[in-house]
Image (spheres, helix red, strand yellow):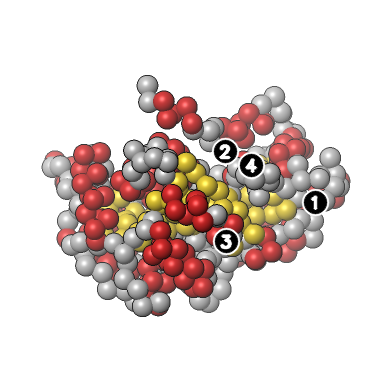
Amino acid sequence: MNPLLDRLQPYPFERLRQLFAGVTPDAAYSPISLGIGEPKHPTPPFIKQALIEGLDSLSGYPATAGDLKLRTAFTDWLEKRYGLALDPATQVLPVNGSREALFALAQTVVDGSRTPRPVVVSPNPFYQIYEGSALLAGADVWYAPSDPARNFAVDWDSVPAEVWQRTQLVYVCSPGNPTGAVMPLEEWRKLFALSDEHGFVIASDECYSEIYFRDEPPLGGLEAASRLGRDFRRLIALTSLSKRSNVPGLRSGFVAGDAEIIKRFLLYRTYHGSAMSGSVAAASIAAWGDETHVVDNRAQYRAKFAAVTPLLADVLDVRLPDASFYLWAGVPPGWRGDDAAFARALYAQYNVTVLPGSYLAREWQGQNPGRGRVRMALVADTAECTEAAQRIVRFCQSNPGA
């Protein structure tokens, strides 16, 4: 067996199942889960119809690179969304959701044969695929903490110069999971300068880019490079339809950016067998070409956050994020930062599931930056999210501390 598998840690949801083992929630309350970031809004009918109409393509093998119509749907959307002009033949590729692409990109970029062992830099807290992809590529991970005092911006300055010298890949998540923070232009400028100096690739995970709460949409990595007068060298952006269009089961997204990396990534994917089904491609073209359903989706999230955030702000350290569908809430002081105990007691007493923030981060340099916080995914409808918030308020009022 591959010995690198032994370096992987349990996934957060497996740890959550272990935390809840032996707990029987109060039967007076129906279960409400805010634990998993799985979109629950209905899939738009026109996307389903496009999927059905594309079923005839099942009789043939799809091309790993996708066809020109699919890739043009990506570049058309990038132009409308960010004002960018990319070549559909060389600067974009279809992927089966951003998760598999985030993993596969590390296998393409990282040279695990180097000595000393290469480094992949990840935000902390983080989406666990970043860590797993790095470890299985033969790299070490350096965890750059998010700073609550700066709206959970990643503290890139905390990474030592000797670590940057070994770094081959940096994962950026903006809007962030779990914090919802958007990386501003000056932070991009700093990271680009570091990439120029040390030669590492930047992977910009942007799967939450279309769920935001202010008038200005979140800045994207390619957009930041363009604003700073740069090309896309050593930069790859990854996005997905799952959150934007409520199709997590479709497994559809794309990557865009540096044409040389795209070329090598295509070679890897050809051997890996990662072609997108023609029927999924047809549904994807329809989805990327329509914004009306995206505006409606965003309005639904805005209504939920407007209803829930003020309720929870009375009992938790929480505020409206820049973007994404998560609330990143600090537990009451009486719990002394024990986010796991808070989540377990809340589940037992009120049958509401939240994810301990410490499960989404690593203990690093003496601290776990997720400790004392919980992640709540507001993916259910407004009524259910509001009911969950009301239960959390009652729980906090009756349980001031562990």
Residue behind mark 2 = 12
The local secondary structure at tag 1 comes to loop
The local secondary structure at tag 2 comes to helix
Residue type at numbered disc 2: Pro
**Number of on-image labels:** 4
Count neighbours of disc 4 (C-alpha within 10 A) and say few if under 14, some if 14 to 19, many if 20 or more.
Answer: some
Judged from this view, the residue extending furthest toward the top is 1
Q: Earlier in the sequence, mark 4 or mark 3?
A: 3
Residue type at numbered disc 3: Asp
State the residue at coordinates (43%, 66%).
192
The local secondary structure at tag 3 comes to helix
Indicate the quadrant containing the C terminus: top left, top right, bottom left or bottom right. Answer: top right
State the residue at coordinates (45%, 63%).
194
Percent position of residue 378, x then y: 59, 54
Relative horizontal placement of residue 276, taking residue 402 as reference (left or right): left
Percent position of residue 99, x then y: 40, 46
Q: Are marks 3 and 2 in contact (CB under 8 Å)?
A: no
Report the Cα–Cα distance between label 4 and label 1. 21 Å
Q: Nearer the viewer, residue 130 or 285?
A: 130
Residue behind mark 4 = 363
Q: Earlier in the sequence, mark 2 or mark 4?
A: 2
Report the Cα–Cα distance between label 4 and label 3. 18 Å
Judged from this view, the residue extending furthest toward the left is 60
Report the Cα–Cα distance between label 1 and label 2. 22 Å
Percent position of residue 3, x then y: 41, 25
Residue type at numbered disc 4: Glu
